Image (cartoon, rainbow, N blue to C red):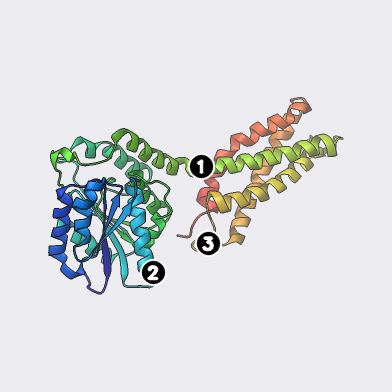
């Protein structure tokens, strides 16, 4: 690793034991004056502070920060990231940090390897990945990993070998993004992987030694409670955008239907039939009401989709003008389909039911619209 680059080691700890002291001393003996270690006491018992954290704070290169009560591993990591980003705000030599577990599960060689890879790839998330096929992996660490890997690799298209590793290298940009994650416990580390897809930064994995003590009895991971939080985060990323699109479309549909109702029943009260080629008679009253309602609701829908659903604004996205042209070409097609079917149904159902029929028609076609907007309209440049 280049000596002019600064990389801190972050160690979140809750009620640690002697293994933490051994690990910290080994780090100091190995790295000497180049060590910058930040230990976060996440609300440990008072006797633990005197026995371990006070001792660590006296080791050269070590800093200890304290949480008054236990807030979770994610909160401890965010405290560390915030501290380091403020400390090195004006220091371009600061690359980022390497996080590790305090229970001695990571070898010095693997920690140093993580630092070396991060120094060469400061814009990436570095993962030290364990081999879960080995027989010495305890059930708490194996729990859910295969399913989680399947979701990440096959569904989310994020290539990973280990979703639960605590040995990670984060560049300062990844640290900054991570501060916006809401989770404060083990789900925070899952969200860190998910934002790699959202923020479009790469992940580099490398194999590490798998070390466990007493079937990993020192872990504070709660398989059921923490596992549910992790899978909720994954589901939120899988379906969150579609749900936001549904809400955006629903609000636009309510506006569209409301305007159509007012126009059709209160402003344009008389039918205006017009014959078109093919001996087809259309009702211009329906056309005018559909057209005005769709123009107003489409402006609202475009704004919501661009700003909130697909977040298609800012650097890296296609120009606003191109999005407008594509959106309204699609809107014309959608309007035509909606109007034609509504006009057809006007000859079949009583006019007092026509608003409900139009709502059903618009609901049927909106799923297709979502994928068209996602893939062809509100997209990033290649």
Q: Position of residue 178 (x, y in %)?
A: 39, 54
Find the residue positioned furthest to the right. 270
Marks 2 and 1, the one that precedes in the sequence: 2
Q: Residue at x 56, y 40 (%)?
A: 246
Left-right relation of 192 to 126: right
Q: Mark 2 falls on what kind of element?
A: loop
Q: Residue at x 79, y 38 (%)?
A: 262
- Image height of 111 relative to 93, above or below: above
Spatial separation of the CA atoms under disc 3 and disc 2 = 24 Å
Q: Quadrant of residue 277?
A: top right
Q: Nearer the viewer, mark 3 or mark 2?
A: 2
Q: Nearer the viewer, residue 303 or 232?
A: 232
Residue 89: mark in rendering? 2
Q: Position of residue 125 (x, y in %)?
A: 32, 57
Q: Quadrant of residue 155?
A: top left
Q: Which residue is mark 1?
A: 242
Q: Mark 1 falls on what kind of element?
A: helix
Label 1 neighbour load within 10 Å: few <14, some 14-19, many 20+ = some
Marks 1 and 3, the one that precedes in the sequence: 1
Q: Which residue is mark 3?
A: 314
């Amino acid at each position: 690793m280049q000596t002019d680059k600064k990389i801190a080691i972050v160690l979140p700890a809750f009620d640690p034991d002697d293994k933490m002291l051994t690990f910290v001393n080994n780090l100091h003996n190995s790295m000497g004056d180049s060590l910058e270690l930040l230990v976060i006491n996440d609300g440990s018992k008072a006797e633990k502070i005197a026995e371990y954290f006070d001792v660590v704070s006296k080791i050269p290169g070590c800093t200890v920060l304290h949480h008054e009560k236990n807030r979770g591993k994610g909160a401890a990591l965010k405290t560390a990231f915030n501290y380091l980003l403020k400390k090195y705000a004006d220091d371009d030599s600061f690359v980022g940090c390497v996080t590790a577990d305090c229970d001695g599960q990571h070898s010095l060689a693997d920690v140093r390897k993580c630092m070396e890879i991060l120094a060469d790839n400061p814009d990436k998330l570095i993962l030290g990945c364990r081999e879960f096929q080995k027989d010495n992996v305890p059930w708490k660490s194996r729990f859910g990993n295969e399913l989680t890997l399947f979701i990440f690799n096959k569904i989310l298209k994020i290539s990973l070998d280990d979703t639960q590793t605590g040995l990670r290298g984060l560049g300062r940009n990844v640290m900054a993004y991570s501060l916006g994650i809401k989770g404060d416990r083990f789900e925070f580390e899952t969200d860190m992987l998910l934002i790699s897809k959202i923020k479009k930064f790469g992940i580099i994995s490398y194999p590490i030694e798998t070390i466990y003590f007493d079937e990993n009895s020192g872990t504070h991971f709660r398989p059921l409670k923490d596992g549910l939080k992790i899978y909720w985060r994954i589901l939120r990323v899988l379906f969150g955008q579609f749900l936001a699109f549904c809400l955006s479309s629903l609000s636009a549909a309510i506006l569209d239907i409301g305007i159509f109702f007012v126009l059709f029943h209160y402003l344009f009260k008389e039918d205006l039939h017009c014959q078109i080629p093919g001996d087809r008679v259309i009702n211009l009253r329906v056309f005018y009401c559909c057209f005005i309602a769709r123009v107003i609701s489409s402006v609202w829908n475009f704004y919501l989709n661009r700003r909130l659903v697909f977040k298609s604004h800012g650097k890296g996205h296609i120009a606003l003008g191109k999005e407008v042209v594509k959106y309204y070409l699609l809107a014309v097609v959608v309007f035509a389909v909606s109007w034609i079917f509504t006009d057809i149904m006007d000859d079949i159902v009583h006019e007092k039911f026509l608003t409900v029929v139009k709502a059903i028609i618009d609901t049927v076609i909106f799923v297709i619209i979502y994928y068209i907007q996602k893939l062809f309209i509100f997209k990033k440049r290649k």
